[in-house]
Amino acid sequence: MLTRRLLLVLCACVLLPVTTASAADKKTRILFVTQSKGFVHSSVKRGDSLSVAEIALTQLGEKTGQFEVDCTQDCAADFTKENLQKYDIVAFYTTGELPIPDDAKDYFFKVWLKEKGHGVLGFHSAMDTLDKYEPYWDMIGGSFLSHPWTSGTQVTLTNYEPENPLTAPFGKDFTLKEEIYMYRHWQPEKVHVLLSLDYAKSPTKNPVPTELGYHVPVCWIKNYGEGRVYCNNLGHNETSWTNQAYLDSITAAVKWIRGDFDVDATPNPQVSTEAEAKAKADFEAHGFTSKK
């Protein structure tokens, strides 16, 4: 069932001004779904309290004053038509075939997500979720194929729009250790790519499956009716949830979804086309091997 991370309550009472109920009601409300029906990532594995990712997103909302977070690992109970009406954003860090009731799926994709001010945040294995359910993978942008770049691999990401508020925190190039996915069901004509893996600066000894192409998108956005979708492959490593650039990008994504500012989310398939050509050339030039 739902849990709310109430942190530093006494300090908040001393340091923050009293907020009226009407003002508090204006904060964006996020339902953070972290249920795993496949691989359970350490970032969303709970012990005696909420997981690393759940605590990080909850604290980010408290620190910025922009949003409040409810966390669930029980879709059958909490991902319902009635409960969704309480929220502005649904965030996914999930795996597998989530037990979302059929009527809730129908409402979520056909009504809720198409409404202005509503949106989705997809973190890491949100793209390894419901891969047999086309409305979901079509919305989220892709389905997990492989991760040749494992959690201890240092990777560099190319930022196509360093002035875009959503990716400005990453600078022109961004380097960190992370697990990076490749995808099936990738549809360049439906997404606006913001970040991609730079093969030339991200060596791996693991074989790379190239039967579906070479380009490795990492962050993208899209419009969904009047709603908005932001996806970022980062978040496998627990350390990513303390990376300020990642957290700042998430904060900007919340503001974008709720309409604080606009950015161009028009699909940019030409970026994927150019990235595919560069990735293939880098693959051949830097000694990568193909997965048989």
Image: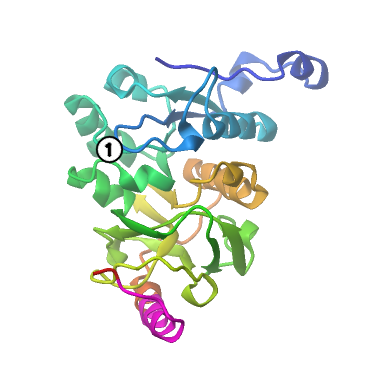
Left or right? Give the position of 262 relative to 281: right
Q: Secondary structure at mark 1?
A: loop
Picture residue at 47% right of the left edge, 33% below the top: 44
Picture residue at 37% right of the left edge, 43% below the top: 126
Looking at the image, can residue 226 be seen?
no
**Is residue 145 covered in magenta?**
no
Judging depth in this view, the residue of 177 and 273 nearest the camera is 177
Residue 91, position as x, y percentages in the image: 43, 36
In this figure, which colouring scheme has been used for the structure? Answer: rainbow
Q: Which residues are magenta?
A: 274-290
Picture residue at 52% right of the left edge, 28% below the top: 51
Residue 288, position as x, y percentages in the image: 40, 76
Give the position of the N terminus as an image quadrant: top left
Looking at the image, can residue 143 be seen?
yes
Residue holding disc 1: 96
Q: Is residue 57 above or below residue 167?
A: above
Residue 257, position as x, y percentages in the image: 47, 44
Picture residue at 57% right of the left edge, 56% below the top: 177
Amino acid type, residue under disc 1 in the picture: Gly
Residue 153, position as x, y percentages in the image: 52, 60
Give the position of the C terminus as an image quadrant: bottom left
Q: Is residue 271 above or below residue 242?
A: below
Q: Is residue 146 above or below residue 79?
A: below
Outermost residue toward the right in this view:
14
Left or right? Give the position of 251 relative to 122: right
Left or right? Give the position of 111 relative to 263: left
